[in-house]
Image (cartoon, rainbow, N blue to C red):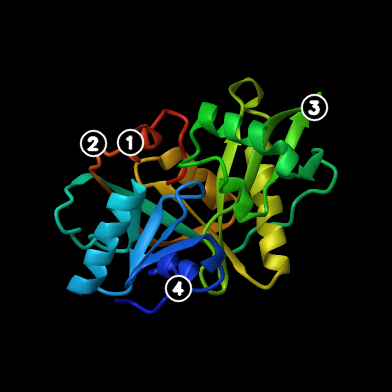
Amino acid sequence: MSGHPLDRQAWSALTGRQTAFCIAEGRARRFHPEVGVFAAVEDGSEDSLAGLARLVRAHGDVALLEPGEAPPIPRVAVRSRDLGWQGVARAVPKPQPGRFDIAPLTEADAAQMLALATLTEPGPFFARTHTLGGFIGIKSEGRLVAMAGERMKPQGFTEISGVCTHPDYRGRGYGSALILQVAAIIQARGETPYLHAYASNTAAIALYETLGFGFRAEVVMAVPNLAGHPSGRSDLYRRGPGRRGL
């Protein structure tokens, strides 16, 4: 398997900077199900895949995000495979100060963050996803109407994710402004921002390119079939018309 952190992003994150969010089973790792769905294995060995199978059965849905076809999980069928676009910051401009009233989001905003993500479907977002950190937002009369934050943090990189805007507030440039602000925060720490989109979402990719993100690699997101599993949450993989990110 490739040694580049972005080729093994979940593995790098879960064995490095984000071990606090990790559940381990042998040579397999996954994010806690209240935080995220991504999982990874150390290698393609039987031991690694058996560990992943145990994680799936114990904790429900996972998604594998790799540069090529995901390894098969023993006795678990794959429900879906989607091709993704991975972009890395190349020439991201500095945010325009004062254009919008952008503020950090806190634990007090957790319920509004989950409600906005549930409405707009920017990608899998759960009750504790916001604890991954770095979330900022725009409010209107105290109501959260747009947000963006950080998700996976492989060595030297941080993913921008959870970018969403309430339907009543779209077309104002909130999403772009939030992406640039999160990117600036990441770069100030000496890390490189990156993000994902479905390869079929050409509009989102075009936007990201105008914001200074360049194509790095195609990735495949594979989701196992857990129909009937008590922890399964298949509905969280609906691909609504507004969804940009994986």
Place of residue 169 in the rendered image (x, y in percent of width and height, measured from the top left): 66, 24
Place of residue 106 in the rendered image (x, y in percent of width and height, measured from the top left): 74, 45
Q: Which residue is mark 3?
A: 142
Eye-nearest disc, 3 or 1:
1
- What amino acid is at disc 3? Gly
Of the numbered discs 4 and 3, the one sitting upstream in the chain is 4
Q: Are marks 1 and 2 in contact (CB under 8 Å)?
A: yes
How far apart are the two marked residues, 3 and 2, measured between alpha carbons? 39 Å
Q: Which residue is mark 4?
A: 5
- What amino acid is at disc 4? Pro
Q: Which residue is mark 1?
A: 234
Q: Would you call the spot at circle 4 few (<14 residues within 10 Å), some (14-19), or many (20 or more)?
A: some
Eye-nearest disc, 3 or 2:
2
Nearer-the-camera pick, 222 or 36: 36
Of the numbered discs 1 and 4, the one sitting upstream in the chain is 4
The residue depicted at 37 percent of the width and 33 percent of the height is 239
The residue depicted at 21 percent of the width and 63 percent of the height is 71
- What amino acid is at disc 1? Ser
Eye-nearest disc, 4 or 3:
3
Of the numbered discs 3 and 1, the one sitting upstream in the chain is 3
- What amino acid is at disc 2? Ala
Q: Would you call the spot at circle 3 few (<14 residues within 10 Å), some (14-19), or many (20 or more)?
A: few
How far apart are the two marked residues, 1 and 2, measured between alpha carbons? 8 Å
Residue 113, image quadrant = top right
Using residue 134 as the reference point, say whether residue 201 is left or right of it: left
Using residue 169 as the reference point, say whether residue 227 is left or right of it: left
Nearer-the-camera pick, 140 or 184: 140
Eye-nearest disc, 1 or 4:
1
Place of residue 136 in the rendered image (x, y in percent of width and height, measured from the top left): 71, 45
Residue 227: which disc?
2
